[in-house]
Each structure stands twice: as C-alpha cells, then as structure tokens.
Image: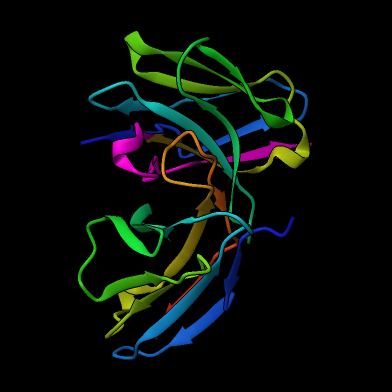
Amino acid sequence: KAGVTQTPRYLIKTRGQQVTLSCSPISGHRSVSWYQQTPGQGLQFLFEYFSETQRNKGNFPGRFSGRQFSNSRSEMNVSTLELGDSALYLCASSLALGQTYEQYFGPGTRLTVT
Amino acid sequence: AQSVTQPDIHITVSEGASLELRCNYSYGATPYLFWYVQSPGQGLQLLLKYFSGDTLVQGIKGFEAEFKRSQSSFNLRKPSVHWSDAAEYFCAVGGPTGGGNKLTFGTGTQLKVEL
C-alpha cells in the first residue's frame, strides 16, 4: 500500500508570493491533518480535514488555508509569504477522525522563503 | 491547554547501552499519548501509543513506554540501542474524539548513538 505522498518535496519562494502544497493520503483514508515544523517552534498543528470539511484549526493567521477534495486529497495554501513561513510542512492521514486511528505522516514539503 | 515537555534536547548513548527518553505532559482529561521517531529527510513514524489499560506499552523496533499518571510522564525506553536508532524522537499528546486528530508535540530529543 502506498504511503502518504506530498508534492512538491522542495520549494523556494520569494516573500510576498503565495504557495500551494499538496497531500495525497493513503488509499481509503478520509482524514488529513497538516503540521508545520520549524527549529524554533517545533511541530505545530495547522488544521485537519474530514469529508471535505475543516474540523479543527490551529493558531495560525488567515494567510494559511486549506481544503480537501472528494477523493480525500488535500491542499494547503499560504498567501503573502513571510520569511518565518520557511518550514517543513507535514501532512498526516488516517482512516477517520479520532485518536484511536493511527496517523501516517508523509515525508513533508520543505518550503524556503527568501 | 495541553502541552508536552521533553526536557532533554540531545542525548548521546553508546551502542548496546540502554536508553530512556523523558516526556511529561499536561492534559485536562485522560490523555492519549504517543511516541514518534523522525529520521533525517523523513516524516514521522509512530513507535507506540497509549490510550488506556496496561500502563506499560510495547512498540516497534524494541521500544516500550510506561505511563505514570501520578508523575504525568510517558517515558520511552529501549534496553539495547542500535546505531540505526539515531534520530529525533517526539512525544505527543492527543485526546478523545472531540479533539479530532490534533496532536500536541514536544520539542523533540535528538538521539546520537556512539559506536
């Protein structure tokens, strides 16, 4: 069974630009969560989606948004990029909502903002 | 608010030696606790989890963890470390269904293994 796929793996953007990251969950998984990982702040929860609806959101500004499609694939968008948005963005998928369902993480997208 | 503390940023052990990584949590109800491992350039891999029941849980790769409610701790152990265990380890806390799948992570412990 294929794992969680994230594209692109690496990305370099300039301040002020916007970026879209993609996450394809494991086949059959309907829940997708996003995390930001930085050396200073560690791993922080961005948001999670289930059945195309955002179910939970972390403390990030409105520049960070996401969506989920009917095939459970998810995208996150960051508008008006800032230097501080440089991070590893991780996506995790699970069968459904609920902590008893194991979450499987993708390899991440490394975003560098210059 | 829930939080996780991993007091050791870096730990170095010799191959074959035992290992214990510390984790303390703060959570208002019965916590769901997890340990993940991250190798360079990789995502997170679940080592083990605790939801309820037996306070000593076994995981993959020979790891185990013990939940101690009185100490709000969930320390990770391995009796004999292998060079391939060198990685970063994260403790995380979550909650029952109402909290969705959100995990709160500790800052991580970087493990170095000396040959």
Please say if B103 is above or below A114. above
Model colouring: rainbow
Q: Residue B7: x percent and y percent?
A: 39, 31
Is residue B76 covered in magenta?
A: no
Residue at image x 49%, y 60%?
A91
In the displayed structure image, the side of residue A4 where residue A110 appears, left or right: left
Q: Residue B60: x percent and y percent?
A: 69, 30
Q: Nearer the viewer, residue A9 or A31?
A: A31
Q: Nearer the viewer, residue B45 or A67?
A: A67
Residue at image x 26%, y 55%?
A58
Is residue B98 covered in magenta?
A: yes
Residue B25 sits in quarter: top left
- Count of marks, rendered view: 0
Q: Residue A21: x percent and y percent?
A: 47, 76
Residue at image x 73%, y 37%?
B114
In the displayed structure image, the side of residue A1 where residue B1 appears, left or right: left
Please say if A45 is above or below B62. below
Q: Residue B40: x percent and y percent?
A: 63, 56
Please say if A12 is above or below A102. below
Please say if A89 is above or below A16. above
Q: Which residues are magenta?
A: B94-115
Residue at image x 55%, y 65%?
A108
Residue B18 sits in quarter: top right
Q: Quadrant of the C terminus of chain A?
A: bottom left
Q: Nearer the viewer, residue A26 or B39?
A: A26
Q: Quadrant of the N terminus of chain A?
A: bottom right
